[in-house]
């Protein structure tokens, strides 16, 4: 069914589906519905799925060591139980929560959590990118509109990051031992047109080191090689894909979350045979 391209595997009805991540412990894909305030799971072996309510906007999620999840909410980074209930606050959102919430997040090779925020007015560039480890929450960069596109190369030496409304993806030199990201430079810049406003949203990296980017309002997923050259473009019926992730046996299936789109297809979970394995992502480790 999935060999020919991206097809819907669950009509999840998300207002804003995001942050898919494979849970090896559950053999399931976990993702969120940000404004729908849900923590969602999909079991590809059985087709079973479930949604658990969360009590505020939830932008990103990842499995945690010992069970449960780390999640980026409007109020901060929280440890959640398996059903989406709050266990404890790991770090408060240091920005104005009336106009800011945590958005995109990803675990680094050593178990740290990287997460960025969203400047909801998209006018002041007040969003930032943060790193959470046992030292606490550290602001790495600022001046952003919508922090997105976080991913790490398979060897952990490159960090990717995008600012969606600015149509740009950056790459940093990354030190997995220290968690330091330096030497930011442009990796990909997308030139919008009057008819195509596709822009880089969430992302994933495969085992070959290629970067897969969801083009929000572009209805496609781009695959770039490590030098930023476009290798492939995979269309899907939904105009607003938000983030790809690799999952299933051998991490060989590409899953894509989407946002609802005023009566058009959207809000469902899509999948296809990727033809390449994804780079494994470890669980969040509070002691990292």
Image (cartoon, grey):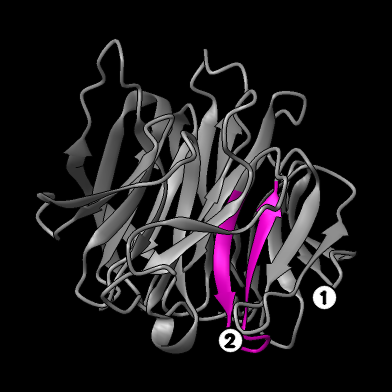
Q: Whole-percent x and y of residue 115?
A: 54, 52
Frontmost residue, 116 versus 287: 116
**Of label 1 and label 2, which has the lower sequence position?**
2
Q: Whole-percent x and y of residue 99?
A: 70, 24
Frontmost residue, 95 versus 259: 259
Query: Label 1's element?
Result: loop
Query: Does the magenta-highlighted stretch encompass residue 20?
Result: yes
Describe residue 276's horizontal placement relative to residue 186 as left or right. right
Residue at 47 percent across and 57 percent down: it is: 7
Instruction: Work out whether residue 192 can be spotted.
Output: yes
Which residue position is annotated with label 1? Answer: 82
Numbered mark located on residue 232 in the image: none
Residue at 25 percent across and 54 percent down: it is: 172
Tell me whether circle 1 and circle 2 mark residues in contact (CB < 8 Å). no
Which residue position is annotated with label 2? Answer: 24
Describe residue 222's horizontal placement relative to residue 271 as left or right. left
Mark 1, other Cα within 10 Å: few <14 / some 14–19 / many ≥20: few
Point out the stretch of residues depicted in magenta. Answer: 18-33
């Amino acid at each position: 069914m999935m060999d020919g391209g991206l097809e819907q595997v669950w009509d999840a009805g998300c207002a804003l589906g995001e942050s898919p991540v494979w849970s090896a412990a559950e053999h399931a894909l976990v993702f969120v519905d940000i404004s729908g305030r849900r923590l969602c799971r999909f079991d590809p072996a059985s087709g079973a799925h479930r949604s658990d309510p969360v009590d505020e906007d939830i932008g990103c999620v990842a499995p945690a060591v010992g069970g449960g999840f780390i999640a980026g909410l409007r109020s901060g980074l929280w440890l959640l139980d398996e059903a989406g209930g709050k266990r404890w606050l790991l770090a408060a959102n240091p920005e104005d929560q009336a106009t800011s919430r945590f958005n995109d997040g990803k675990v680094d090779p050593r178990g740290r959590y990287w997460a960025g925020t969203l400047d909801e007015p998209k006018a002041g560039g007040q969003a930032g990118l943060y790193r959470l480890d046992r030292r606490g929450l550290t602001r790495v960069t600022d001046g952003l509109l919508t922090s997105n596109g976080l991913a790490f190369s398979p060897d952990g030496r490159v960090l990717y990051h995008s600012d969606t409304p600015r149509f740009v993806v950056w790459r940093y030199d990354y030190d997995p031992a220290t968690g330091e990201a330096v030497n930011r430079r442009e990796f990909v810049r997308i030139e919008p047109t009057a008819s195509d406003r596709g822009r880089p949203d969430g992302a994933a990296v495969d085992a070959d080191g290629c970067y897969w980017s969801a083009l929000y309002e572009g209805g496609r997923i781009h695959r770039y090689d490590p030098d930023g050259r476009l290798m492939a473009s995979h269309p899907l019926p939904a105009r607003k894909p938000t983030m790809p992730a690799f999952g299933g046996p051998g991490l060989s299936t590409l899953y894509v979350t989407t946002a609802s789109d005023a009566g058009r297809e959207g809000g469902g979970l899509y999948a296809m045979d990727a033809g390449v394995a994804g780079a494994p992502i470890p669980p969040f480790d509070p002691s990292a």
